[in-house]
C-alpha cells in the first residue's frame, strides 16, 4: 500500500521540522505564499463551495473544541485552495497543516480570548469564501493576506 502524496510530504516536513529550527514566521511566510497564490489563480467553476460551506457551518458551533476548530479551519483553507486547479499547492498546504498541527494548537490555546479570535476567524472565512465564489481573485487574495497576517500577529507571542 502506498501513502497518499500529502502523507509522504507531511512525513518529509515532519522530519525537517524535527531536525531544524522552523519558526512561526517561516510558517506564516509559506502560508502567505501558497494561499495568496491559490486565490490569485482560483476559478469559481473549480471550487468545491459546498464542502467549504459545510466546514464553516461546523466551525459555527461555539461548543467545538479548539483542536477540532483548528482542524476544520485548516481543511477549509486546503479546500478553497483547490479552486486554483494546482494539486501540488493543495497537497503542500495539506502536508504543512499536518506537520504544524501541534504547533498551531499550542499557539491557539495560549490566546487569552479564544472565543473572540474564533468569531473573527469565522467572519473572515466567510468573506474569503464569498470573494472566491464571486471570482474576485484580488479581493480574495487580500482577504487571505490580512487573515493570515492577523492570526500570525495575534499568536506571535
Image: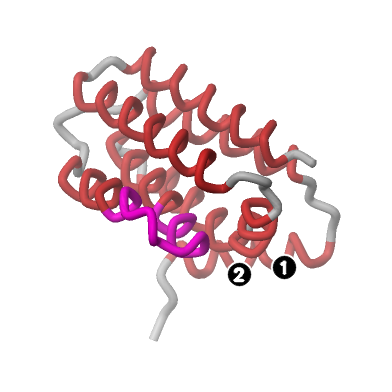
Q: Look at mark 1 in the image and give the residue it sits on.
A: 15
- The percent coordinates of residue 25 (x first, y second) are 74, 38
Q: Secondary structure at mark 1?
A: helix
Is 54 left or right of 91, judged from the image as shown?
left
- The percent coordinates of residue 81 (x first, y second) are 36, 39
Q: Secondary structure at mark 2?
A: helix
**How many marks do you count on the picture?**
2
Front-most of 46 and 25?
Answer: 25
Report which quarter residue 14 is drawn in. bottom right
On whether residue 20 falls in the magenta region, the answer is: no
Q: Residues within 10 Å of mark 2 (few under 14, many from 20)?
A: some
Q: Residues within 10 Å of mark 1 (few under 14, many from 20)?
A: few
Vertical placement of residue 18 versus 108, above or below = below
Q: Look at mark 2 in the image and give the residue it sits on.
A: 11
Is 40 left or right of 95, judged from the image as shown?
left
User: How far is the residue under mark 2 from the one under mark 1?
Assistant: 6 Å
- The percent coordinates of residue 60 (x first, y second) are 31, 48
| Magenta region, residue range | 58-72
Contact? badges 2 and 1 (CB < 8 Å): yes
Report which quarter residue 16 is drawn in. bottom right
Is 90 left or right of 103, judged from the image as shown?
left
- The percent coordinates of residue 103 (x first, y second) are 68, 58
Amino acid at each position: 500500500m502506498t501513502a497518499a502524496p500529502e502523507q509522504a510530504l507531511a512525513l518529509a516536513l515532519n522530519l525537517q521540522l524535527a531536525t531544524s529550527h522552523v519558526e512561526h514566521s517561516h510558517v506564516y511566510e509559506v502560508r502567505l505564499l501558497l494561499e495568496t497564490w491559490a486565490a490569485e489563480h482560483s476559478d469559481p467553476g473549480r471550487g468545491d463551495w459546498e464542502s467549504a460551506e459545510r466546514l464553516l457551518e461546523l466551525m459555527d458551533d461555539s461548543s467545538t473544541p479548539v483542536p477540532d476548530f483548528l482542524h476544520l479551519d485548516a481543511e477549509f483553507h486546503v479546500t478553497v485552495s483547490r479552486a486554483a486547479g494546482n494539486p501540488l499547492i493543495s497537497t503542500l498546504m495539506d502536508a504543512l497543516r499536518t506537520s504544524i498541527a501541534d504547533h498551531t494548537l499550542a499557539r491557539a490555546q495560549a490566546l487569552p480570548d479564544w472565543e473572540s479570535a474564533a468569531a473573527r476567524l469565522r467572519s473572515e472565512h466567510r468573506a474569503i469564501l464569498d470573494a472566491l465564489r464571486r471570482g474576485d481573485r484580488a479581493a480574495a487574495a487580500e482577504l487571505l493576506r490580512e487573515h493570515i497576517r492577523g492570526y500570525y500577529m495575534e499568536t506571535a507571542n
